[in-house]
Amino acid sequence: MSNDAKERQLAANAERPNGLAGRLGAFVRGWLSHPLQVVTVLAGLIAAGGGIAVIWLVAQPRPAPREMSKMEAALTALDARDLETAKAWAEAILSEPHCPRPQQAEAAFVLGAAAAYEAEAVSPRKRRALYLAAARHLEDARATGFPEGREAEGNLLLAQSLVGAGQWAQARPSLLSALELNPERKAELHRWLCQSHLSDSSPDLKEALRHNQAWLAAGALTEEEQLGALLQKAEILLRQGKLDESEAVIRGIAPREIDAAAVLLLQGRLLMARALEQRGASAAPSQGDIPAGQDQADKQRLADEAQRKQLWQEAAKTLQAAAGRDLLSGETAA
């Protein structure tokens, strides 16, 4: 073999890969020289790996769903307003032997809340009995503590139940707690607080007026609520003897036809208060009166009596009109 042929053979042998490592390196270099093939293969490998992962996850044993407790079932039914189911779960809890006191309180909450919600949908004749039952259960629940996260609902329903049962004084602590926990219901709660102070045997007119003003300032009142708040304000001012302020409120009211009787009644009472005020003023002569001015005093007395008589007549006429309006409203409603 010539020297040139030997050199070419040696060069070819140097370029040919030796062993497994050499052949593998040559294979990789060959693939890398074709980028499109590399991308296609990698995408296939990734897709295959993802499919395997999904299959593995699906094949894993899943934990059995946790069984809902009786109390959770009762609260779920209560929130769905399935009141009969909620009461059944609560009674099942109470029927358990040696039921712990916290669970008894939770069951009492469910029974009280269910009775309060039920009272909203029955006739007025049946409503008071349901509210009394609701208040009894809810007071029992509050003594130990309402269920976690139910404090706002519990205090609001207790206050509503006591108000619905006519127990205004007993409702006041719950009304104040509910006001703190339910700011979105502040208009209604201030109205109830105002009425609770007016319903006392010795009404606290100052506190009643404060809650009335808070009610009016709560905003977003309906026309009926606005009228009710203004009538209540005029009533409080009248009872405080602030006749001018009460009259100013009444003059600012534009009642609907159905509310005319209430406005006329308040106007009649205001006129009666004016007449009594006039009588008191004329019955107390000033120290400057002397016998020499008796004629003038008599003229003033007669004028006062005439004015007082006119006020009484206007009051009677206004009250009669109020009674007529009230009867008309009743006939229309019937």
Image (cartoon, rainbow, N blue to C red):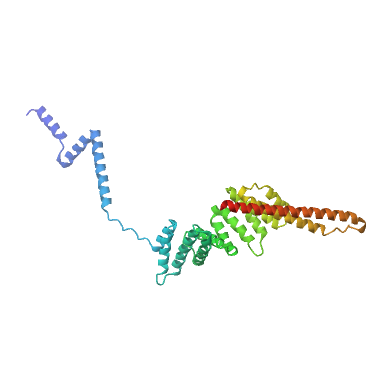
Q: Residue 27, how many percent across, how many down?
A: 19, 37
| 286, 175: nearer the viewer | 286
Task: Say which residue appears at 82% left-offset and 57% top-offset.
Answer: 282
Quarter of the figure that contains the N terminus: top left
The number of discs equals: 0
Residue 323 appears left or right of 63: right
| 231, 64: nearer the viewer | 231
| 167, 282: nearer the viewer | 282
Quarter of the image where one finds residue 29: top left
Residue 126 appears left or right of 74: right
Q: Residue 212, how many percent across, how many down?
A: 63, 54
| 28, 116: nearer the viewer | 116
Q: Residue 198, how many percent across, how many down?
A: 64, 60
Task: Say which residue appears at 11% left-offset and 27% top-offset.
Answer: 4
Residue 157 seen in this snapshot: yes
Task: Say which residue appears at 65% left-offset and 53% top-offset.
Answer: 324
26 shown above or below 77: above
Task: Say which residue appears at 60% left-offset and 55% top-offset.
Answer: 191
85 shown above or below 101: above
